[in-house]
Amino acid sequence: MDFIAELEWRGMLHQLTPGIQEHLSEGPRRAYIGFDPTAPSLTIGNYVQVMLLLHWMRAGHEAVVLFGGATGRIGDPSFKEQERDLKTYEELDGNLAHQKRQMEGLLQRGADAGAADGLRGGVTVVNNLDFYREMNVLDFLRDVGKTLTVSYMMSKDSVKNRLETGMSFTEFSYQLLQGYDFQKLYAERDVTVQMGGSDQWGNITSGTEFVRRNLEGKAYAVTTPLLTKADGSKFGKSAEGNIWLDPDLTSPYDFYQFWLRADDADLAKYLKYFSLRDKEDILADCAVVEAHLGGEDRYREVTDIRTALAAELTERIHGAEGLNTALRVTHLLWGRGATPEDLRGLDTKAFTALSGNIPTFELPAGLLPLPLLDLLADHSEVTSSKSEARRAVQGNAIAVNKEKVADPDATITAADLLHGRYILVENGKKKRYLFSVTQPA
């Protein structure tokens, strides 16, 4: 597999330094991508770079994942409008440990789900705090700070864009640290290529300068475009914030739904960026999407393509169990013919996902047993009054845990709780409510 050619047909190539294609053709190489541990989890935006690593290793090259245990203490100013708030060391260390576990799982599942040729190259994980742990400020200024001139550093967009709003020396020094990272990896691990998003081009090329000036070596850079939606908004953002790759922050159901709700205009791009199916199959699906956008009625086919992509990515990120949960919750909320058995088959994580997508009410356990009409009218917004609740029951509109209730004098007891905690109430075909029973402290 030709790595650069792979990026080109996928639309994932933004910039590269001259000579890299010849460099890669001479034999297996090592490249690295840096990841910032300032967030509690990797996000779907980070997954663009995970895909870059997967393609790199599929092409037979070795990969290094560099976590910024040191640079995370500084904060990358690239395309930030103002100074970052510094995280505590404890928070950064916890984030890094979690992201490391995430990365190992993502790469393994990516390898399992990849093309038949699999991943020929291996991967090593490094923490750049190890480069600086024993370095004092004088060593840094002499060995690192002398490499680049102030005018060179000021020419980078990450600095120029912040001149009016201001930048501390702390953030100004960030590109020195990232440049020195490249030098250390080049010298100690024979890493000759750094990859990243297009917003990192300035920092990455600073690294190639470190290698050239201090080691008299030749290093290379590759960047991907920053992925945006058709409307120009940032990829991976929702009304609530990031689409996280942690099931406790973004449930498998919400992750799955993110792809199902993708705009038709974005679908071909998502297929090329994220699918690991054969090139011919991906391009065939892209052709269907483009024909639909051009005016042909290919709605059903596009829906099937979107659903298949959602399933592929949900399983790769959250595993078969996560996909199964996402499908069960989707069927429960939007499908036809969901049964009480379907509901009882959901695990507690699925109910957590439900609670974020339908009206949810807390109910103290001490209130049970509780007349159904009281539950509907006094302890929720299912109905506005007991008389309305009674009419709804008599009209066969109320279901508790997917079972219709015909008796207005029915009582809700602890035996009705799913997983000892949850009750699902439906009023008609489309209105659903979740009750979460809380135990006394």
Image: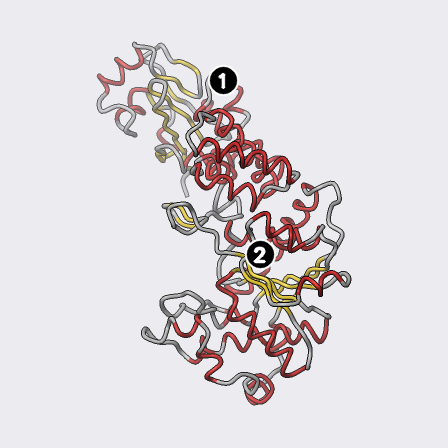
Helix, strand or loop at disc 2?
A: helix
Q: Position of residue 399 (x, y in %)?
A: 39, 17
> What is the quadrant of residue 183 in the picture?
bottom right
Q: Nearer the viewer, mark 2 or mark 1?
A: 2
Type of colouring: secondary structure
> What is the quadrant of residue 116 in the picture?
top right
Instruction: Establish if 320 lies above or below 50.
Output: above
Which circle's residue, 2 or 1, is located before the other in the chain?
2
Residue placed under numbered mark 1 in the picture: 339
Instruction: Establish if 78 lies above or below 351.
Output: below
Between the C-alphas of marks 2 and 1, the distance is: 38 Å
> What is the quadrant of residue 49 in the picture?
bottom right
Q: Position of residue 174 (x, y in %)?
A: 50, 74
Give yes or no for contact between labels 2 and 1 (Cβ–Cβ under 8 Å). no
**Classed neighbour count for the residue bearing mark 1: other residues with Cα under 10 Å, few (<14), some (14–19), many (≥20):** some
Helix, strand or loop at disc 1?
A: loop
Horizontal side of residue 93 vs 258, given as left or right:
right
Residue placed under numbered mark 2 in the picture: 99
Please give the name of the residue rendered at 32% of the width and 75% of the height, measured from the top-left corner.
164
Instruction: Establish if 441 lies above or below 193.
Output: above
Instruction: Establish if 390 lies above or below 145.
Output: above
Asked whether residue 102 appears in the rendered view, the answer is: no
The foreground one among 387 and 236 is 236
Amino acid marked by disc 1 = Thr
Amino acid marked by disc 2 = Gln
**Classed neighbour count for the residue bearing mark 2: other residues with Cα under 10 Å, few (<14), some (14–19), many (≥20):** many
Q: Position of residue 291 (x, y in %)?
A: 48, 32
Asked whether residue 386 appears in the rendered view, the answer is: yes
Q: Position of residue 14 (x, y in %)?
A: 53, 58
Please give the name of the residue rendered at 59% of the width and 59% of the height, measured from the top-left corner.
97
